[in-house]
Image (spheres, helix red, strand yellow):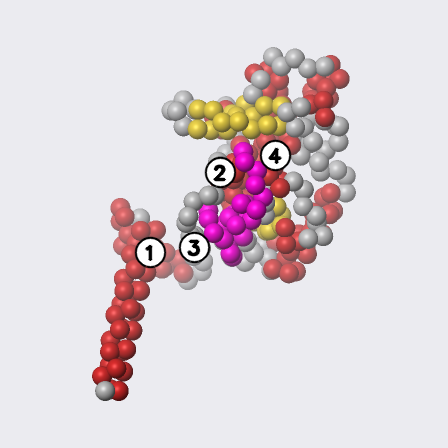
């Protein structure tokens, strides 16, 4: 059990919201909690969100790396310096209205769409997120709406998981994040430190039939591999056609 001054322990014990309380009580009892425990013991499909809930109460949480049962690297969370905890939530009163105003401003400027999937969505499903994670870049000014993005729940979960497993989560270099796909999918150099490019395709309406055909012809290769092969073959044909056209033009000019 973690030994803490009574005043701080009482303040932690007073947290009643289910998700942050679960995290706090586990750390108080065991000293730390891992993403594996959050998932397997408490059934949280998105462990980083539970940790974020605690941090948003102003409670300092530090992240370290450990190994799961199979030897895979996972995140481990402990209390930071609680003597600096003021007891004031990061999301103070009035922040909800501010977030709503920010969301409306983003929708007005960029449209009601997910920045990752680039699909129009019901505004009610979209969530405002920092382009650079708060844990790395700190709180951004809401006057600069370019520092925020709109994400659907699945994209938000995927981004949080990826960021927590990125090498920059410990290094905390904001410029590195700014050149990442998860911060600026419209213009990026890397995807969580890896030299990659991403195209996200969402099938809707009549396109669902195209999706079904894609799956049927993909077999064990998978849709992604099949799409890459189709594109590769298409570009090869275009290159050959361009060469033939250039050769024909050259012959005609002789």
Residue at label 3?
199
Residue nearest the viewer, comparing 113 with 234: 234
Give the mark toward the camera: 2 or 4: 2
- Image point (52%, 50%), residue name: 179
Residue 52, disc: 4
Q: As displayed, is residue 6 above or below residue 193?
A: above
Dot placed on the residue nearer the N-terminal end, 2 or 3: 2
Q: Position of residue 152 (x, y in %)?
A: 55, 48
* Magenta part of the chain: 170-191
Q: Position of residue 50 (x, y in %)?
A: 58, 32
The answer for how far apart the CA atoms under marks 3 and 4 are is 28 Å
Residue 227, disc: 1
- Disc 2 secondary structure class: loop
In which image quadrant can residue 71 be found?
Answer: top left
Residue nearest the viewer, comparing 168 with 127: 168
Residue at label 2?
166
Q: Position of residue 115 (x, y in %)?
A: 54, 54
The answer for how far apart the CA atoms under marks 3 and 1 are is 11 Å
Q: Is the Cβ of the residue at disc 3 closer than 8 Å to that at disc 1?
A: no
Dot placed on the residue nearer the N-terminal end, 1 or 2: 2
Dot placed on the residue nearer the N-terminal end, 3 or 1: 3
Residue nearest the viewer, comparing 154 with 232: 232
Which part of the image, by quadrant, shows the N terminus? Answer: top right
């Amino acid at each position: 059990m973690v030994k803490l001054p009574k005043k701080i322990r009482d303040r932690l014990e007073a947290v009643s919201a289910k998700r942050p309380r679960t995290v706090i009580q586990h750390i108080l009892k065991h000293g730390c909690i891992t993403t594996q425990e959050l998932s397997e013991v408490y059934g949280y499909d998105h462990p980083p969100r539970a940790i974020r809930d605690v941090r948003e109460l102003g409670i300092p949480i530090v992240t370290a790396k450990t190994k799961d049962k199979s030897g895979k690297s996972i995140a481990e969370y402990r209390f930071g310096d609680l003597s600096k905890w003021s007891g004031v939530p990061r999301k103070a009163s009035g922040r909800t209205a501010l977030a709503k105003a920010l969301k409306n401003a983003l929708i007005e400027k960029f449209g009601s769409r997910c920045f990752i999937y680039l699909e129009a969505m019901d505004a009610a499903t979209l969530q405002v997120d920092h382009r650079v994670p708060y844990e790395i870049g700190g709180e951004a000014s809401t006057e600069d709406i370019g520092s925020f993005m709109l994400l659907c729940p699945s994209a938000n979960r995927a981004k949080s998981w990826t960021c927590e497993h990125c090498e920059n989560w410990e290094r905390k270099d904001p410029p590195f994040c700014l050149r990442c796909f998860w911060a600026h999918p419209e213009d990026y150099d890397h995807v969580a430190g890896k030299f990659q490019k991403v195209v996200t395709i969402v099938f809707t309406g009549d396109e669902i039939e195209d999706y079904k055909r894609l799956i049927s012809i993909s077999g064990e290769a998978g849709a992604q591999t099949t799409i890459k092969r189709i594109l590769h073959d298409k570009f090869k044909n275009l290159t050959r056609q361009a060469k033939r056209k250039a050769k024909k033009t050259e012959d005609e000019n002789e």
